[in-house]
Image (spheres, rainbow, N blue to C red):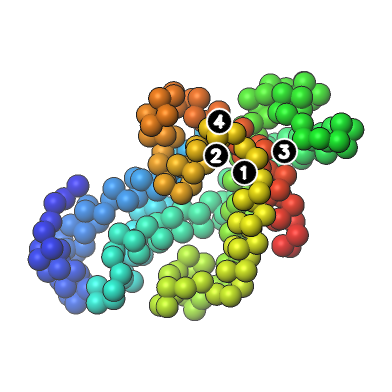
Amino acid sequence: MTNLNVLEEKKLWQLWKVKGDPEAGDFLVQKYMPLVYFHSQRIGASLPKSVNKEEIKSLGLMGLLDALNKFDPARDLKFDTYASFRIRGAILDGLRKEDWLPRGTREKAKKIEAKIDELEQKYMRHVSADEVAKQLDITEDEVHQTMSEHFFANVLSMDEHIHDQDDSEGKSFVIKDDKTATPEEEVMKGELIAELSGEISKLSEKEQLVLSLFYQEELTLTEIGEIMNLSTSRISQIHSKALFKLKNQLIKLNGSGN
């Protein structure tokens, strides 16, 4: 990472924005590339192994370049905050367009969901991943992995639905000048949080902590493992189990919004 003091960076921004100086632009890219690595790693942790991690970084870099071109240094907003929205938005937007979830995974997810519904109607209670796995003659890990991937796909779908009213630049992840969400976005987000908060409260303390550290504190699975003194694979398992428990509520909310 390139270390720059405030005056040096201010001069680079002036050269870049006023004169389009390519060398100044390169320096700024180098300084903020760690943001691309961070968001690529964080989002990549929830994706299947079939997704090319270098492609995720490329999408993130496009977001960074977009931020460099459109950021106004005169605004009362830190660039790393602005760039983080752009980088994350570019990655998620790219994933939506690519439809990275394989057809086979979608079909398997449908079978798992159907079996969950069948068993829950039969037993009149929530069923475990182990029970579903035995009924379908697959491993418990397959159930967790499939539903974790499907959960993330639904998050992308919901995010796209919430932002279906694109702005004049045609980008759903653009930060608005007033830095506030539209009333429609606030209502949908509020409803989602209210509904999911009840389900999250039913999770174990470890599951709640992992979700909080991952989604609120934006730590990686490895960093969470260090904090909780558990292996990364164990944290990944806790994360997947928590998503499995939440998936019914999310799918129901997603379906009601269509």
Provide the secondary structure element on which disc 4 rests: helix
Amino acid type, callout 4: Ile
Residue closest to the eye, 154 or 12: 154
Q: Earlier in the sequence, mark 1 or mark 3?
A: 3
Q: Which residue is the site of mark 2?
A: 208
Q: Are marks 1 and 2 in contact (CB under 8 Å)?
A: yes
Provide the secondary structure element on which disc 2 rests: helix
What residue is drawn where x is 42% and y is 46%?
218
**Disc 1 to disc 4, C-alpha distance:** 15 Å
Q: Are marks 1 and 3 in contact (CB under 8 Å)?
A: no
Give the left or right position of residue 192, taking residue 51 as reference. right
Q: Which mark is residue 238?
A: 4
Q: Earlier in the sequence, mark 2 or mark 3?
A: 3
Amino acid type, callout 3: Ala
Task: Report if residue 175 is visible in the image.
Answer: yes
| Mark whose residue sits in front, 3 or 4 | 4
Residue closest to the eye, 25 or 114: 114
Q: Which residue is the site of mark 3?
A: 109
